[in-house]
Amino acid sequence: MGLSAMRDVLATTVSRKALIAFCVLGSAGANAATISVSSLSASAFDSHTPIPHSDIAQSDGDGIVKAMLSCATERYTHGVLGDAIEAGCLVVEDNEGSVFKLDLPKSQVFEDLIPRIADVNADGKNDVVVVRSEQGQGAALAVFNLSQKQLKLLVDTPSIGKGNRWLAPVGIADFTGDGVMDVAYVQTPHIGGILKVWSFVDGDFVEIAQSRGFSNHRIGDTRVSTSKLADRNNDGVIDIALPDQRRNNTVWVTLFPEFTVLESNPLSSQDFD
Ligand SMILES: [Ca+2]
Ligand SMILES: [Ca+2]
Ligand SMILES: [Ca+2]
């Protein structure tokens, strides 16, 4: 192949990538504004920079095996996670070594420090769970996965509905013992925290429990959640430990067979090691 023919092939490849690079997800609400940008090229995961204080998630298995919060931005002026810098994009690597990046629209950030890798929709492939915040709407818990070689929104909870209102994820597990994955977080942990638990049913999140009186985060702390998951009562189903709103007590709750407070003990910092 001559040099000029090679240039033509390259140009075609670039233009095809440009065409598939931008895809508007969904048709209604905040999701319609989410722009998914994926890269089929060998753009190395490590060439991206994580935002300050954030962790890079790693996992075994299929689907997403690495996830990073990147594209540092100060465009969302809330600053409850140690500084005013949030993430404008999510970068993931799949088990075949391909790297994908999802840039949020300017009205949104990832207000989080830990991407959480889990198979939320039970298709055998890892997804990633992060807090996404929007100007005027506040935070929502959002799940992204790889579909047709693009990093896309799989499902999200409703936004809190007011700007600068945040939620602190507690964990992802089957809290109800029915074999279906659930997610738990504390909504507005600084101003009256509500534990909310959602189950992934028929492609959407369905709220299965909520209870007031918890606080798993202090303003400014880079630990996203002071909480613990363990089977406290040895019934084979994972339970949740959280500080109460005043952070005087450690409260263990279970969702099985229904929402129940198992224990409430004076809080010790070791409770959440
Ligand atoms: Ca999955
Ligand atoms: Ca469940
Ligand atoms: Ca249990």
Image (cartoon, rainbow, N blue to C red):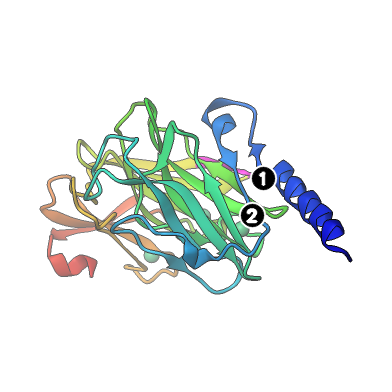
Residue at 49% x, 45% y: name it. Answer: 142
Magenta-colored span: 202-206
Q: Where is residue 92 in the image (x, y as percent from the top left)?
A: 54, 59
Q: Where is residue 268 in the image (x, y as percent from the top left)?
A: 12, 65
Q: Which residue lies furthest to the right in this view?
A: 1
Question: Could you tell me what secondary structure mostly forms the magenta stretch?
Answer: strand
Residue 21: mark: 1
Q: In the rendered image, is residue 173 in sight?
A: no
Q: Does the magenta segment cover residue 203? A: yes
Label 1 environment density (alpha carbons within 10 Å; few <14, some 14–19, many ≥20)? some
83 left or right of 30 in image: left
Q: In which quarter of the image is the C terminus?
A: bottom left
Q: Where is residue 132 in the image (x, y as percent from the top left)?
A: 43, 42
Look at label 1 and name its amino acid. Answer: Ala
Q: Does the magenta segment cover residue 185? A: no
- Position of residue 153 relative to residue 265, above or below, is above
- Residue matched to label 2: 39
Whether ligand 1 has any atom under 8 Å from the Cβ at mark 1 is answered as no
